[in-house]
Structures are given as C-alpha cells and as structure tokens.
Amino acid sequence: MTFYVYIIYNIHHDIFYIGSTHNLQKRITEHKTGKGNYTSRYNGYWCFLYYESFPTRSEAMRREKEIKSWKSKTYTKKFIREKRRSAG
C-alpha cells in the first residue's frame, strides 16, 4: 500500500491544508465536497496543489509533520512554486 502527503489550498480564505492518506483521490474528493473535518469549516474551493508518496504510513506522517512545522504560508508557497518548476 502507498501512503501520500498532500497540500491543498483554499483561495477564498488563503489557507493551506496539509494531510496524509492511503487513498489520495478519495480524500481530495472529501475535502472538495465538504466532508473533511477541518476543511469543511471553510467555504470556498479547495485546490489540490501537491503530493508526495511513501511506502509506509510512518514515513508519510513524518513528512506531514515536517511540512506542517514550516508554519509559514510564504515558505509553503515558495516550496510549491519550486516543485512545480522542477516538474515542468
């Protein structure tokens, strides 16, 4: 089984959400349809920005915690821009 860490963004509220899951497509759909616990509090569209895959849940959770520790929207935005440039 593969585990994922992902980043989504709410344009209306200018907030990021970082999460982890073993079923990325289902989890993103839950966020976009208002079924995510945290994200359902915020109206507006959640835009899927980025993901990383890991072979174990513990590795995914470690990476999720690392990304959340950044605590800076500016750093998160810079990280996303750099990843998109290197992928394109």
Image (cartoon, rainbow, N blue to C red):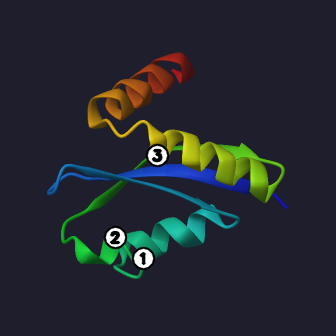
Q: Which residue is label 2 attached to?
A: 39
**Mark 2 burial class by Cα count in 10 Å: few <14, some 14-19, many 20+:** many
What residue is drawn where x is 20% and y is 51%?
11
Q: Which numbered disc, 1 or 3, marks the residue that appears first in the sequence? A: 1
What residue is drawn where x is 41% and y is 71%?
31
Image mark for residue 68: 3
Q: Position of residue 62 (x, y in %)?
A: 67, 47
Q: Position of residue 64 (x, y in %)?
A: 58, 49
Against 86, residue 51 (above or below) is below
- Are dots 2 and 1 in contact, CB under 8 Å? yes
Q: Mark 2: which amino acid?
A: Thr
Q: Is residue 72 left or right of residue 36?
A: left
Q: Position of residue 51 (x, y in %)?
A: 57, 45
Real-space CA distance between mark 1 and mark 3, rounded to the nearest whole angstrom: 17 Å
Q: Which residue is label 1 attached to?
A: 36
Q: Position of residue 20 (x, y in %)?
A: 60, 59
Q: Mark 1: which amino acid?
A: Gly
Real-space CA distance between mark 2 and mark 1, rounded to the nearest whole angstrom: 5 Å
Which element carries disc 2, helix, strand or loop? helix
Q: Quadrant of residue 23?
A: bottom right
Q: Is residue 46 left or right of residue 44?
A: right
- Are dots 3 and 2 in contact, CB under 8 Å? no
**Mark 1 burial class by Cα count in 10 Å: few <14, some 14-19, many 20+:** some
The quarter of the image holding the N terminus is: bottom right
Q: Is residue 60 left or right of residue 87?
A: right
